[in-house]
Amino acid sequence: MSSIEPTAGDDDPFEEQRERVDNPMQRLVGEYGRPYWLSVALGIVASLAARLLDLLPVVLLGIAIDSLFQNIEPFSLPLVPESWLPAEPRSQFMLVIGLITAAFVTGAAFHWLRNYGFNAFAQDIQHDVRTDTYDTMQQLDMGFFADKQTGELMSILSNDVNQLERFLNDGLNSAFRLAVMVAAIAAYLVYLNPQLAVVALSPVPLIAVFTYIFVTTIQPKYADVRSSVGDVNSRLENNLGGIQVIKSSNTEEFESGRVEDASREYYETNWGAITIRIRFFPGLQLISGAGFILTFLVGGLWVFSGSGPGPFTGTLSTGDFVVFILFTQQLVWPMAQFGQIINMYQRAEASAARIFGLMDETDALETDADSDDLVVTDGDVDYEGVSFGYDDENQVLDDISFSVDGGDTLALVGPTGAGKSTVLKLLLRLYDPDSGTIRIDGQEITAVDRRSLRQSIGYVGQESYLFYGSVRDNIAYGSFDATDEEIRAAAEAAEAHEFIQNLPDGYDTMVGERGVKLSGGQRQRIAIARAVLEDPDILVLDEATSDVDTETEMLIQRSLDDLTTDRTTFAIAHRLSTIKDAEQIVVLEDGRIVERGSHADLLRADGLYAHLWGVQAGEIDSLPESFIERAAQRQARAEPAED
């Protein structure tokens, strides 16, 4: 459960995991890119061809100026035999026009192939990473989720995965396009005039140094930005989920302040990265622009004078000068764009580190991969010396031992915070005990396949969570192949069929987010119907009728009596009248068993259970002072409220 204290500014909950991840981008491409190498290979080859074709019109323009318009050099084309070329100038001109047209048309086709290849590569990896990350996360124990906020996890599954897609598509695509363009232009400029090429390419080393400084400065900033995004998402998710409490408590102004604090923290963190970025890109453009101006100056003087200025020697034709100017101009934007690519890479690397930090999280519930399935025969359940705490400081259960015979019902009774729900969470292996063992028909639950264990147990908790979807979908959740007749029979057993029929669309009525369109009692009956439909070997009822009225509870209890016949059942109820017929009642206080026996036995013992019963039955006015003092002590220790 999320803290009510402001979270903005907290440390990244995944910082420790993130710091353990080495070379996240290499791991991303190595693990997830390998299956899709054909797509990225297509993108690379097409990018190479497209870039070369984009440069061809400028090369042809320079040849046309010197050969056809100024007639200072014979007409020739690189890599084309002279015998293949027409001799007449007009035909040569039309050939140049035809080649330029073909370059544009063919280049457009290769650009389409390039975009297709890189987009397919990025989308496939994005899909695999998101699904694998979610699958890894949902396999983790509940202790992991207790320390994380939903918004933080959503930020990784959504924002961070999308950040990878942006780099793999736009960033990687642009990187290859830029590399091909710079390499091809540099090679051709050196081919035309090595001396002037040195001038044109002189900004490249400065850009490399400038970019290195930018990378080392911006990298830690982006890690902080990704963390602050998670803080904002957590605050928004927390508040939207609790909007009813906010409105009923008249705390809109208070919550607006907390959202503003979280948003301000993100703003300041992101602005720190932005200030670095907005200084970097103009500086990069200035360096690139200086290279263009220097090339224009030296080349222009060279053409005017007819000989190389200063240390430069030889001649420079007008056509070659035009090619240098156009190619140098084309270099300015790619060099400036290189900073954008580095920027996207740094963001993606921060996101990849958070994703792999989550994927590398280890499950605290250890089970051998080749564990046998649980086989339930009689349904006997044994707790032996079980102790457990949600953290190292607070012990919730202390040396719990009891046995339940197959087909019997065991009820857990005790004050809030006594550890009742925790006892049942350990049976489901939502957590593992710190010490002691739990067995079902002699099989230790930590030694059997966890999936088979949970398939054997039907659980109805205090909070009846419904998924967004129809009533039918929620009853059949976990029993997806159930027929309409089976779904209806389960609803009738849970006393839910009548109210479902009165809904606007019956079983096809959409329940809304978390079942918000239904009352608490209606949600609880649907949850019971879900458990009925699963037909489990062991049934766990944790306050399963707490949200229904007394009359409905009696009807549901009658149905549950039929359901629990010959089925091992665990039940928690604050209304003791619902569990008085259980074969065994275990009374917990402060995480220890203080009483056990049948209803009649416990009344005769005149202990805690008898006092609780007397208060509910109206036979006594209040609990003993000693019990009230112990309850106050429990509240002071802030033990888990769900028990």
Image: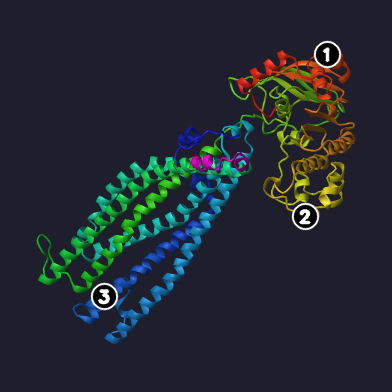
Tag in front: 3 or 2: 2
Q: Residues within 10 Å of mark 3 (few under 14, many from 20)?
A: many
Estimate the x, y position of residue 470 in percent, counting from the top left. 74, 52
Residue 152 can be seen, yes or no: yes
Count the marks.
3
Q: Is residue 5 above or below residue 414?
A: below
Q: Secondary structure at mark 1?
A: loop
Q: Earlier in the sequence, mark 3 or mark 2?
A: 3
Dominant secondary structure, magenta: helix
Q: Magenta span covers which residues?
A: 245-258
Residue type pointed to by label 1:
Asp
The Cα–Cα distance between marks 1 and 2, rounded to whole angstroms, is 51 Å
Question: Label 3 belongs to which residue?
Answer: 63
The circle on residue 598 is none
The circle on residue 508 is 2
Contact? badges 1 and 2 (CB < 8 Å): no
The Cα–Cα distance between marks 1 and 3, rounded to whole angstroms, is 108 Å
Contact? badges 1 and 3 (CB < 8 Å): no
Q: Residue at x 51, y 37 (%)?
A: 357
Estimate the x, y position of residue 142 in percent, counting from the top left. 64, 33
In the displayed structure image, the side of residue 575 where residue 592 appears, left or right: left
Quadrant of the drawing holding the N terminus:
top right
Question: Label 1 belongs to which residue?
Answer: 606
Q: Residue at x 29, y 78 (%)?
A: 82
Quadrant of the drawing holding the C terminus:
top right
Q: Residues within 10 Å of mark 2 (few under 14, many from 20)?
A: some
Q: Earlier in the sequence, mark 1 or mark 2?
A: 2
Estimate the x, y position of residue 430 in percent, counting from the top left. 68, 31
The one nearer the camera, 146 or 242, is: 242
Q: Which of the 4 image quadrants contains residue 110?
A: bottom left
The Cα–Cα distance between marks 3 and 2, rounded to whole angstroms, is 73 Å
Tag in front: 1 or 3: 1
